[in-house]
Amino acid sequence: MPAPAFVVRPVNWLATREKLRMVRRAVFIEEQRVPEELEWDELDEHAYHVLASSGTGEPIGTGRLILDGRIGRMAVAREWRGRGVGAAILQTLIDLARREGLTCVRLHAQTHALGFYARYGFVASGEEFDEAGIAHRAMEITLAS
């Protein structure tokens, strides 16, 4: 039986931070030109993180859930986009939120990704705003209990 193309799993920040940082650095800092000082914050140590890895173990995607119900730092390596990695990361984060008893999950979506999040039930609200030099909109989803 062939190895799966990729796997997504919850991980511990301290144990896997170098892999998580590798993906976020490539996507946010290098590709999207987010200033490095805006990318790293104290919330990482207290958030749930998920890591997507290729069948060979290469880190290819990540996302985090803060316990106040915010999803963020979702990133997928360029060569893995459009292959279901982002969807699997998002679903894993939503599952974690449900497990924690959260009834609502919020995120700041880059405007080019609004359709992606809408496909999973997120609804945009408010005006477009700038975050780290990139246009975003607030989105949220109410979780069924």
Image (cartoon, rainbow, N blue to C red):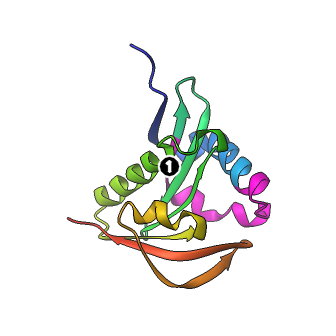
Please tell me in which quadrant of the rendered image residue 102 appears: bottom left
- For image coordinates 22% across by 66% down, the residue present is 144
**Residue 17 drawn at (x, y percent):** 63, 44
Quadrant where the image shows the C terminus = bottom left
Q: Position of residue 105 (x, y in %)?
A: 39, 69
**In the figure, is residue 140 to the left or right of 114?**
left
Under circle 1, the secondary element is helix
Residue 41 colored in magenta in the image: yes
User: What type is the residue that disc 1 sits on?
Assistant: Gly
Asked if residue 142 lies left or right of residue 126, the reply is left
Residue positioned 59% across, 65% down in the render: 112
- Frontmost residue, 118 versus 40: 118
| Residue 82 falls left or right of residue 42 | left
* Whole-percent x, y for residue 84 in the image: 46, 43
Q: Residue furthest top?
A: 1
Extent of the magenta region = 28-51
Relative height, residue 55 to residue 127 (above, below): above
Q: Where 9 falls versus 107 (above or below)?
A: above
Can residue 6 be seen here?
Answer: yes
Is 30 inside the magenta-drawn segment? yes
Mark yes or no: residue 66 visible: no
The outermost residue toward the left is 145
Give the labeled residue for mark 1: 86
67 on left or right of 144 = right
The residue located at (29%, 56%) in the rendering is 99
Q: Nearer the viewer, residue 133 or 48?
A: 133
Does residue 55 lie above or below 142 as drawn?
A: above
